[in-house]
Structures are given as structure tokens and as C-alpha cells.
Amino acid sequence: MNKKDGGIIGFVTNGAWLEVTGLDGMRKCLEREFSTIYVFNLRGNQRTSGELSRKEGGKIFGSGSRASIAITILVKQPNKPINQKAKIFYHDIGDYFSREDKLRIIKDFGDIGNSRMDWREIRPN
């Protein structure tokens, strides 16, 4: 890629990479390589039980997944200094939402610029 190039990548993945210790290298790489990162945590981890499982809410892909799901948008600005870390913005969908609720919320938000998204800037530790 030419240093003058920038761009945007968006993807939907298993959300485990947000918290799993074994993926801290991936998180550090994303923080180093991109200018801005938006993470919309849809939750849905059904590998839990009891109250914690109910809080995670419905599985976004129905019976097709037991894992949490995240939508991630990576923005790369061509003039970002090499040693500058990305600004990371995070939005958690919240507790106890069904699959249908989550899909409606995604549709209603429409895009990351919606002021109702209530992005919270986070700093990884």
C-alpha cells in the first residue's frame, strides 16, 4: 500500500478478540496500524450460564453461533504518524436484548455517525 493511501475496513466477527488474553497482539497491531477504530459489541456469548447468559441476550445469528459478535470499523488516515496509536471508540449494545431487538437497534442506528450511538473512547490496558 502506498503511504498516501487510506481507507476503511468493516467486518463482523466473533467478539472474543475484544477480551481474550491470547489475542492482545492482534489488538495492539490494530491500534498501531489504524487511525480510528469503532467497535460495536453485540454480545450474545452463550458459552456462559445462568444470569450472565441471560444478560448477554440473544445470539445475533440465531442458532448458528454461540459466540459473542462485534461489528468493527477500522479507519486508516494516510497522514497518521507512525508512533501515534489509534483512537478507539466502543459501544456496548446492553443487557437482555433478544436477537430481534439487536437487529432492530442496528437498523435504527443506521451508521456510526448517529448521535444515539453514544461512542465511548477507550484506552486499552
Image: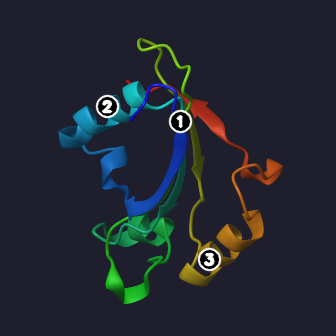
Tell whether label 2 touches label 3 (CB within 8 Å): no
Q: Earlier in the sequence, mark 1 or mark 2?
A: 1
Is residue 74 in view?
no
Q: Which residue is mark 2?
A: 29
Question: For residue 51, which quarter of the picture?
Answer: bottom left
Tell whether label 1 touches label 3 (CB within 8 Å): no
Q: Position of residue 93 (x, y in %)?
A: 60, 59
Q: Is residue 122 above or below residue 108?
A: above
Type of the residue with mark 3: Leu
Q: Does 67 sit left or right of 81 as displayed?
A: left
Q: Which residue is mark 3?
A: 103
| Foreground pick, 79 / 115 | 79
Q: Which residue is mark 1?
A: 6
Q: Is residue 26 above or below residue 31?
A: below
Q: Residue at x 34, y 85 (%)?
A: 64
Q: Earlier in the sequence, mark 3 or mark 2?
A: 2
Q: Residues within 10 Å of mark 1 (few under 14, many from 20)?
A: some
Give the structural element (helix, strand or loop) at label 3. Answer: helix
Cα separation, mark 3 vs mark 1, equals 30 Å
